């Protein structure tokens, strides 16, 4: 409980200080900024700094309490790589101009570092497969949370829910260090969320979203499920992080289908599509929170099942996900989409004729 509450309080208290600093320095994102944002007025960045500081204090405290050299090394590497990613995100927030290729290179280096220090995937087969899966996982989840930071409170809330699910799973399997780190990640995100839920007073920026995504990717890799068949255990982190993976898959496929670059920002995420059909922003975000909670509980259930039952549950979840993705893909968010043009033709066909003037 202390691992959750202490970072929560630090992030809660520090975020308003970051807000004041961002306002003084005019570090703002407004309607003329990125197209993926939904704000109608300028909103400060720098909330991610509060998240990073709160988690760093947790790691320093854990290191002071547990002086085992192996634990200290792993904690130092975990935090050090996260700080590099946060610094890159902060630099991009402040100045911009960091190319997608450079970002991917740094993130791939983070994944390689994670694997080299014993925190990577362990799959049957050649070692090269473990390296590739570890790098792909770290890069994918880190960017998924960066992409998910597209609506007030969404990325921070989903990060908190996923981290709590990892904490519960780790505690049930006797991994108390992983459980504490996951609880701390949830606490940081929850403390920041107090100031980020709609209408947001401050954004976390790339510094926060990259940091949280990286932490959750490492927590997923570090989770060990005793008694769970290996085939089933592989899907547990995928379920916990199912929502950001779903959203990233949706926008990637749809942008490619409509001739857009997957790296190009836009208001075409799952959250934007829900708002497009008339759901208010806070309601849409809460619906996605509920989805994240449901996936977390499904992951806890999956970890207790045998191979056949577990794979049936995974198949069920994937079927529902594919169905929902198909529905959301029909929402005409792009100007050049056939669905949008067809919808406009239908609407125009039912518009009343303009009244003629009579002499």
Image: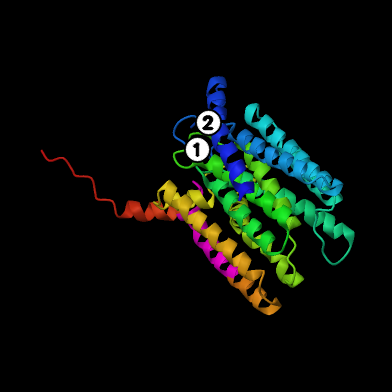
How is this picture coloured?
rainbow
Q: Residue at point 75% right, 44% down?
A: 65
Please give the label number shown on residue 195: 1
Relative image position of residue 338 (x, y in whole percent)? 49, 54
Asked if one can make out residue 105 in the rendered structure from this viewpoint, the answer is: no
Relative image position of residue 168 (x, y in whole percent)? 63, 59
Query: Residue lying farthest left?
Result: 359
Q: Which sits in the foreground, 26 or 306?
A: 306
Relative image position of residue 112 (x, y in whole percent)? 83, 48
Q: Secondary structure at mark 2?
A: helix
Q: Which sits in the foreground, 348 or 24?
A: 24
User: How far separated are the C-alphas under marks 2 and 1?
Assistant: 8 Å
Q: Give the labeled residue for mark 2.
A: 16
In the image, taking residue 165 as reference, residue 153 lies left or right, namely left
Q: Residue at point 40% right, 52% down?
A: 279
Please give the label number shown on residue 302: none
Q: Which sits in the foreground, 331 or 4?
A: 4
Vertical position of residue 289 compared to residue 196: above or below: below
Q: Badges 2 and 1: C-beta atoms under 8 Å apart?
A: yes
**Chief secondary structure of the magenta span?**
helix
Crowd around label 2: few <14 · some 14–19 · many ≥20 (10 Å): some
Vertical position of residue 346 compared to residue 10: above or below: below
Asked if one can make out residue 239 in the rendered structure from this viewpoint, the answer is: yes
Crowd around label 1: few <14 · some 14–19 · many ≥20 (10 Å): many
Query: Residue lying farthest top?
Result: 24
Mark 2 or mark 1: name the one nearer the start of the chain.
Answer: 2
User: Looking at the figure, which quarter contains the C terminus?
Assistant: top left
In the image, taking residue 289 as reference, residue 130 lies left or right, namely right
Q: Residue at point 60% right, 55% down?
A: 164
Find out whether residue 101 is within the magenta segment. Answer: no
Q: Which residues are magenta?
A: 317-339
């Amino acid at each position: 409980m202390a691992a959750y509450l202490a970072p929560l309080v630090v992030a809660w208290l520090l975020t308003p200080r970051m807000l004041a600093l961002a306002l003084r320095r005019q570090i703002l994102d407004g309607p003329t900024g990125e197209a993926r944002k939904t704000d109608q007025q300028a909103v400060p960045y720098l909330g991610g700094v509060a998240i990073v500081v709160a988690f760093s204090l947790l790691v320093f405290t854990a290191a002071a309490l547990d002086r085992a050299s192996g634990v200290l090394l792993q904690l130092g590497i975990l935090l050090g790589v996260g700080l590099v990613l946060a610094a890159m995100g902060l630099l991009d927030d402040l100045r911009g101009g960091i190319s997608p290729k450079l970002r991917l290179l740094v993130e791939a280096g983070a994944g390689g570092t994670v694997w080299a220090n014993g925190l990577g995937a362990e799959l049957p087969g050649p070692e090269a497969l473990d390296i590739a899966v570890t790098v792909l996982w770290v890069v994918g989840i880190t960017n998924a949370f960066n992409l998910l930071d597209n609506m007030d409170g969404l990325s921070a809330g989903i990060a908190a829910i996923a981290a709590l699910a990892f904490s519960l799973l780790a505690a049930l399997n006797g991994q108390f260090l992983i459980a504490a780190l996951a609880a701390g990640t949830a606490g940081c995100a929850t403390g920041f969320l107090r100031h980020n839920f709609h209408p947001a007073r401050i954004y976390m920026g790339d510094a926060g979203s990259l940091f949280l995504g990286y932490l959750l990717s490492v927590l997923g890799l570090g989770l060990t499920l005793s008694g769970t068949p290996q085939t089933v255990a592989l899907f547990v982190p995928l379920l916990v992080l199912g929502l950001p993976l779903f959203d990233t898959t949706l926008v990637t496929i749809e942008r490619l289908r409509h001739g857009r670059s997957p790296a190009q920002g836009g208001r075409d995420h799952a959250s934007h599509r829900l708002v497009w059909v008339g759901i208010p922003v806070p309601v849409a975000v809460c619906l996605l929170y509920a989805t994240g909670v449901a996936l977390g509980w499904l992951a806890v259930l999956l970890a207790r099942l045998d191979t056949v039952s577990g794979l049936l549950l995974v198949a069920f979840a994937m079927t529902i996900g594919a169905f929902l993705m198909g529905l959301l893909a029909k929402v005409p968010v792009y100007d050049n989409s056939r669905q949008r043009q067809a919808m406009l033709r239908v609407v125009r066909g039912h518009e009343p004729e303009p009244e003629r003037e009579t002499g």
